[in-house]
Structure formats: C-alpha cells, structure tokens
Amino acid sequence: MNVFVDYDVILDILLERKEFAFSAKVLESIEKGNLKGFTSPIIFTNTFFLISKAKNKDLAWNALRKLRLLFKITRINQNIVDQALASGFKDFEDALQYYSAIDSKVKYLITRNKSDYTGEEVIVVSPQEFLAILAKNKFN
C-alpha cells in the first residue's frame, strides 16, 4: 500500500518526540516493507535547514540519507505547482505536497494536521487513524 507521510509525522521521529508513538509505528511499518512510503522533496530541504540550525550540517546530511533510504520521493513539477496555485489551500506547501501525493497515486496521506488538507482525492488520516485502519484490514 502506498502512503504519503507528511513532515509533521517525520519530524516527530527526527526530534524523538516520545508523545507521538503512533508516528514511530507508521515509519516502522515503512521500514519493515509493509508499506511503501512517499514524501515530497520539500521535506528534505526543511529537514536540512532544521537539523543544520539545531545541531550541525553533518547530522543534517545523515538524516537526509536515512530519509532517502526510507522514502520514495514524489515529484513537484509545473503541473503540480499549477494545481497547488489553483487549489484554494491556505498553505502553499501543503497544497504542493497534496498534489504531489495524488500524482504518486498514494491511497493515504498521513499527517497530524488533517485540517491542512482539504481535498478528496487522497484519504487524509492521522497516524493513529491509519494504524487503526491497518489493524482492521489485517483481521478482515
């Protein structure tokens, strides 16, 4: 199953936020090969900036390499930008990610900020909701 993982979920792991265990379980499923994880190239620039400022550039590069091994990268091209501009999303970055997720034919977009995504072409769920869906499908 193809899933797009939003930056807030990835950030939970990078910052080792203990209160977000559901995010860790989603990434663990991707690591084990139970899911095919996608994310956008935007995540890489944001991660590099954040870790470079908070820690150092060597750690930032290492984080990017780990993310690259874990995720397939969606594309952002002229068509995606045009869709994002016309979308009516409040946040342009969210719009880019949403339309790049659609372009990659993912079924779910996993985020802790569901209200940021207003479209209907992809099922937007929290990490906890997604894990419940996985558990339900496992037993059906």
Image (cartoon, rainbow, N blue to C red):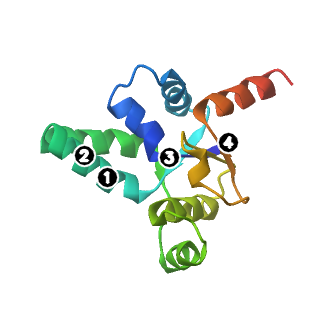
Does 50 appear above or below 135? below
Q: Earlier in the sequence, mark 2 or mark 4?
A: 4
Give, as a three-letter code, the residue at label 1.
Asn
Q: In front: mark 2 or mark 4? A: 2
Callouts 4 and 1 close, C-beta under 8 Å: no
**What residue is disc 2 on?**
50
Q: Earlier in the sequence, mark 3 or mark 2?
A: 3
- Give whichever of 133, 126 is nearer the camera: 126
User: Tag 1: Cα neighbours inside 10 Å, few (<14), some, or many (≥20)?
Assistant: few
Q: In front: mark 4 or mark 1? A: 1
- SS for callout 4: loop
Q: Earlier in the sequence, mark 1 or mark 3?
A: 3
Q: Which mark is residue 32?
A: none
State how far apart marks 2 and 4 are (Cα). 30 Å
**x and y, in percent, of residue 117 in the image:** 60, 55
**What residue is disc 4 on?**
1
**What residue is disc 1 on?**
46
State how far apart marks 1 and 3 are (Cα). 12 Å
User: Tag 2: Cα neighbours inside 10 Å, few (<14), some, or many (≥20)?
Assistant: some
